Image (cartoon, rainbow, N blue to C red):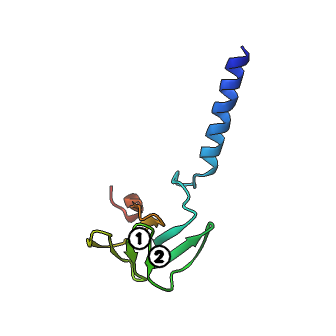
């Protein structure tokens, strides 16, 4: 019985931590990185966003420009769209297409 209670308590705490890190849209909060928001590149640092003022190089060598142009470490080029996010490690997370009226 004690083992069952401990298991339930641990599961509850684990779910609490996961839920605390989600936004209203059920997306994980990114504490550091860049994102395209309202047509402007924003930089997030410690959970605070500010306009991106200069080109940034991510830890994996990916370069992100202030206009949303991205040059991946392998030389491939792309453009960040509304809602797209990139972590400081260079991991890209595409924005929610439902917000743009697409399904």
Residue drawn 65% across the image and 41% down it = 16
Residue drawn 47% across the image and 85% down it = 54
Residue drawn 45% across the image and 63% down it = 89
Q: In this image, 63 relative to 38: left or right?
A: left
**Image quadrant where one finds the N terminus:** top right
Question: Is the residue under label 1 in contact with that under label 2 (CB below 8 Å)?
Answer: yes
- Image coordinates for residue 62, horizontal then vertical, percent: 37, 71
Q: Secondary structure at mark 1?
A: loop
Q: In this image, 91 relative to 46: left or right?
A: left
Establish if 40 lies above or below 1: below
Q: Which residue is mark 2?
A: 38
Q: Residues within 10 Å of mark 1 (few under 14, many from 20)?
A: many
- Image coordinates for residue 47, horizontal then vertical, percent: 62, 66
- Where is residue 7, by image quadrant? top right
- Image coordinates for residue 10, horizontal then vertical, percent: 67, 31
- Viewer-side residue, 16 vs 3: 3
Give the label on residue 82, or none. 1
Q: Count how many numbered circles sit on residues in the image.
A: 2
- Where is residue 76, by image quadrant? bottom left
- Where is residue 14, by image quadrant? top right
Q: In this image, 42 relative to 67: left or right?
A: right
**Image quadrant where one finds the C terminus:** bottom left
- Viewer-side residue, 3 vs 37: 3
- Image coordinates for residue 2, horizontal then vertical, percent: 73, 17
Q: Residues within 10 Å of mark 2 (few under 14, many from 20)?
A: few
């Amino acid at each position: 019985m004690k083992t069952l209670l401990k298991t339930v308590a641990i599961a509850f705490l684990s779910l609490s931590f996961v839920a605390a890190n989600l936004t209203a849209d059920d997306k994980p909060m990114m504490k550091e990185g860049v994102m395209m928001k309202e047509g402007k590149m924003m930089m997030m640092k410690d959970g605070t966003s500010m306009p991106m003022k200069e080109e940034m190089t991510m830890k994996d060598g990916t370069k992100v420009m202030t206009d949303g142009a991205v040059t991946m470490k392998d030389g491939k080029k792309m453009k960040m769209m509304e809602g797209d996010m990139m972590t400081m490690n260079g991991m890209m997370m595409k924005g929610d297409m439902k917000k743009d009226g697409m399904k």
